[in-house]
Amino acid sequence: MNPLISVVVPIYNVEKYLARCVDSIVNQTYKNLEIILVDDGSHDLCPQMCDDYAEKDSRIKVVHKKNGGLSDARNAGMAVATGEYISFIDSDDYVSDDFFECLLDVMNKENSDIAECSVVKFYEDNRFDELNDDLSVKTYDTQDAMSALIAENPFHQHVWNKLYKTKLVKDIPYAVGKLNEDEFWTYRVFGRANKVSKLNKTMYYYFQRNSSIMGVGYNIRRLDALEGKANRQKYIENNFPDLSMQAKIDLYGSCMFAYQSVLKFMSGADKKKALSIIKKYKKNCNLSFDEINTIKDSSKKYFMLAKFNFCLCCKIKSVFKIGF
C-alpha cells in the first residue's frame, strides 16, 4: 500500500534556490506524491519555473496567488491537498531522497500520527553544522509529546521536518500575517495526535541565508512568538493542565530572552514599544518562588534574579551574551 503524500511548497522570490528544493522532492525514493507548488506572487522567475516543472511531472500542481505571506501560501496549498499524508517544505531548503519513505515507514511501524526527523543547518558558503545521528526511533503519547515539544527536546516547533496525517491538520489554518507562525500551529496539531515519533536521522537541510525573514535583524515582529506561546499557554491550561507549569516557565523564559534581545538589538521608539509588549506578557505569566523552585537546571538562578528585578536580570544576560 502506497498512500498519497501531499507536499506543500510555499514559494516567494527564491529562483536561486527553487530547483534545489523541488528536485529533492521530485527525486524521492517514495514516488506517490502530490507536489503542490504555491507561487505566492513572486516577482522573479519562480512562476515560470513552477509551470515548467508541472509540464514535466504530472504529480506537480501549481497554485499562483497574490502575495499573502508564508502562512497564507501554506493554507492555499493545504486547501487543494488530497493526500492521506501531508508535509510542508520551505522553498530554500531541501530534503534527503529518502525523506518521505523513512518518515512514512516510521509512522506505519509505530502507528503514529506525526513523524519528525532531525535537521541540519547549512550556509551560503556551503558549510554544514555537525550531525549526530544514531537512527533511533522514539514514540510518545499525546501528553509526553506535548511536554517534549514545550521543552524543544526532542521535538521542535518547525512544521517542515515532519510528516502528518492530513486529517490531523486539514482544519487548522496557519496564522496569517504572523512571524514565527510555527508557534501558533504546531502545538495544536500535537494536541490532536495519539502518537508522535522522532527519527534521529538527518533528512531535512535548513538553509541559513542572510536575506531570509529570520535572517534580518531583530525587530518588533519577532515578538509574535510571545503571542504564539501565550496562546499555547491558554491551550495547555485548558487541555493539558498537568503541563501548565512547564509551559508557563517556558513562556517566562521566552519573555526574558525577548527582553534581552530588544536591549541588545533595538533602539528608539520601537525599542520602547517592544519592551512594553514584553512586560505585558511577563506580567500575565509571573512566577511565584515556589514555581521557580521547581526548575531543576542551571537557569533557575536567572529566574530567581528576574523575580527580584526582571530588567536587571535581562541586562546582565544581554551583556554577558547568555542565551544567545
Image (cartoon, helix red, strand yellow):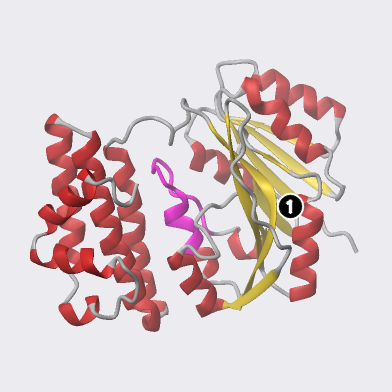
Query: What's drawn in magenta, residue-wise?
Result: 172-187
Main SS category, magenta section? loop
Viewed as shown, does residue 5 lie left or right of 299?
right
User: Number of callouts in the render?
Assistant: 1
Residue 192 in percent (x, y) is at: 55, 72
Residue occupying the point 21% across, 58% down: 281
Front residue of 321/110: it is 321
Residue 186 falls within the magenta-colored stretch: yes
| Residue 291: quadrant of the picture | bottom left
User: Can residue 161 be seen?
Assistant: no
Q: How crowded is mark 1: few (under 14 residues within 10 Å), some or many (20 or more)?
A: few
Residue type highlighted by circle 1: Thr
Residue 10 in percent (x, y) is at: 60, 36
Front residue of 256/38: it is 256
Pick out the residue farthest to the top.
44
Q: Tag 1's secondary structure?
A: loop
Pick out the residue farthest to the right.
1
Residue 118 in percent (x, y) is at: 64, 55
